[in-house]
Amino acid sequence: MKQGAKILTIEKCTNTNTAARAIAYARSLSGLSQKQLSELTRIDQSDISKIERGVANPSISTLQRLAEAMGGELEIRVNFKKTK
């Protein structure tokens, strides 16, 4: 990750729209337009738009490409609640 880069943490991702908003927010923090991100990742701008609107279901490799192009890294974490 680039020095001084901001870390975006989504504490609870309960639906596609939450993840979509996280991608859009991370892109805005990176200062990239959808077109610029498209050029960096070779993902069609229309597909990036669909991801950000929550109408596409991107693969982990696509999310990885997006994260890296924005100067970040993809981290997926599953937390389980403790049970008695």
Image (tube, rainbow, N blue to C red):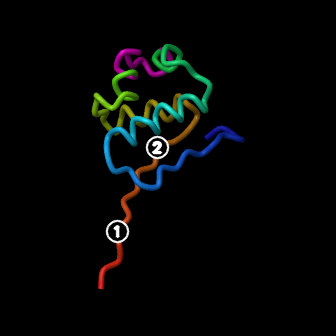
Q: Which residue was labeled with disc 2?
A: 74
Residue 16 versus residue 12 in the image, above or below: above
* Residue 32 part of the magenta segment: no
> Mark 2 or mark 1: which comes first in sequence?
2
Q: CA distance from mark 2 to mark 1?
A: 20 Å
Instruction: State the quadrant of the C terminus.
Output: bottom left
Residue 83, image quadrant:
bottom left
Residue sitting at x 71%, y 41%: 4
Residue 21 in the image: x percent, y percent? 44, 36
For label 1, the crowd category at 10 Å Cα-Cα, with few meaning under 14, some 14 to 19 and many 20 or more, is few
> On the rendered structure, is 2 left or right of 22?
right
- Helix or strand or loop: what does disc 1 sit on? loop
- Three-letter residue code for mark 1: Phe
Prevailing secondary structure class for the magenta stretch in the rendered image? helix
* Residue 47 part of the magenta segment: yes
Question: Magenta residues, as a range?
Answer: 39-48
- Helix or strand or loop: what does disc 2 sit on? loop
Residue 81 in the image: x percent, y percent? 35, 72
Residue 2 in the image: x percent, y percent? 66, 38
| Residue 80 numbered tag | 1
Residue 34 versus residue 16 in the image, above or below: above
